[in-house]
Image: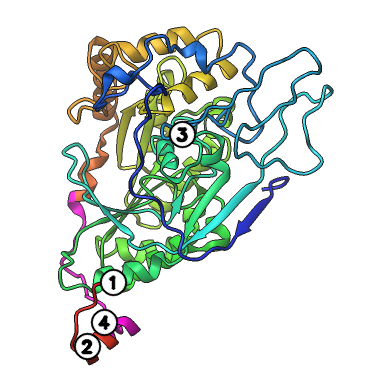
Amino acid sequence: MSGQNTVYIYSIGVTPVSRFPKFPEGIAAPFPEQPGSSRPTDDDPTLTPEHYIHRNQVARKGRGAVTNLRGRYETVSREEFDDGWQPLPFSAGVGGAEEPGEEGSEEDDEPARLKTIVTEETAKSIISRNSSPDLPFSLSLNPYRGCEHGCIYCFARPSHSYLGLSPGLDFESRLVAKTNAPELLLRELAKPSYVPDTITVGINTDAYQPIERELRLTRRVLEVLHDCGNPVALITKSALIERDIDLLAAMAAKRQAIAAVTITTLDPAIARTLEPRAASPARRLRVIRTLAEAGIPVSVSIAPVIPFVTEPDLERVMEAAVEAGAGQAGYIVLRLPWEVSPLFRQWLQAHFPERAARVMNRIQDMRGGKDYDADFATRMRGTGVWADLLHQRFEKAGKRLGISHRNRAFATLDASQFRRPLVAPTVREQLRRNDGQLDLF
């Protein structure tokens, strides 16, 4: 994209820390509404949304988050304040990398743009497993951490806290690429213990985000799955998926590939602020048409549904997607886990201040009075009368259009044609076999 710079930082053996300390005594946990807190007495009852939301929230062009909100594992909080000596420059907060020559000044109408910084990681494992009863898959693979699309509602934003980075602007500007993902996948599939099953690619962060155009990790992952006959499911907001139609069409012919395209709204102005670096709604409809014409089963994911923002478009999105060739549809009510809640509130204040309170009130109506409830039975749909009305609208529109729920597409995939690859042993494995000794490391 023009006017956007990407900086690549090459490193070897970068692995995330697996354990993190709790908040020390005297440091308030910043998200008292979140479920699962083992020490609710540590929450500061005086902490309110006003602590992280200001009336003069200003959005950055091409970025979803408004600030670099500190992660929940940080023990130090930094805040700018006006001491009266000089005007405050726009800033990204801790960790932001501003483009040279674009520092904020009194004459600036908007904050300085941020560079995208990519760090290469040598991952130790690549397939994630889950047993969530509300998900239609148990295996997933994510070639990247963070996502340049910058969707403000992304449920994966809190994962950047594990890296010591902010779930805000850092999540969309400081990315991690798992450069050995294809090789790791090949070794996973070669293990005798691996049971063939559908692998969902890009479920946390979009596997076709802008940096994929150059790094091609998703393409190489698909080549492995194609060669081994392992079923794959993809979900994306990017038109880059069209690049891999040759692989996907061949797999779809053997019932080994399905795809979903996320469309939250047909309004390009709203989409530009909600998902600033994703393809436009019109372009995503073209992607659905292109995939369908290539014989690839494609569905539309209307996720998330945001009351009074994208919710009025629900039926129109379904109609447009079906006209383009979508065979299934699904929806998810807005989820606000951990840091996503204050980040979304900031976004509302920056883009829709006149309806911010109304939106949050309706969200809390569907979440039992809270910003979010992580219960498996309700986290995707919500509860209460408004959630029921939304479900009725979706079901009636689906019946009228003659489409089924997208989760049913997973049942059509065939893993019986899986071919286990032969992988040469590593140097360590060869030495272990020659020595006849166990390697504790």
Query: Dot 2 corresponds to which residue?
Result: 433
Instruction: State whether residue 371 is above or below residue 281.
Output: above
Crowd band around label 1 with a 10 angstrom C-alpha radius: few (<14), some (14–19), many (20+): few
Task: Identify residue type, mark 4.
Answer: Leu
Residue type beneath disc 2: Arg
User: Which residue appears at 32% of the width and 71% of the height?
Assistant: 186
Considering the numbered disc 4 on the image, is that residue within a helix, a strand or a loop?
loop
71 vs 125: above or below = above
> In whole angstroms, how far apart are the C-alphas of marks 1 and 3?
31 Å
| Mark 3 Cα shell of 10 Å, populated few (<14), some (14-19), many (≥20) | some
The answer to whether residue 224 is magenta is: no
Q: Nearer the viewer, mark 1 or mark 4?
A: 1
Q: Is residue 421 magenta?
A: yes
In front of the other: 307 or 353: 353
Camera-side residue of 254 and 33: 33
Q: Nearer the viewer, mark 2 or mark 4?
A: 2
Residue 218 visible, this orientation: yes
Give the foreground label among 1 and 2.
Answer: 1
Q: Which numbered disc, 2 or 3, marks the residue that appears first in the sequence?
A: 3
Cα separation between marks 2 and 4: 17 Å
The residue lying toward the viewer, choosing from 139 and 252, is 139
Residue 441: assigned label: 1
Q: Is residue 325 above or below residue 144?
A: above
- Separation (CA) of disc 1 from disc 2: 15 Å
Q: Which residue is mark 3?
A: 74
N-term-proximal mark, 1 vs 2: 2
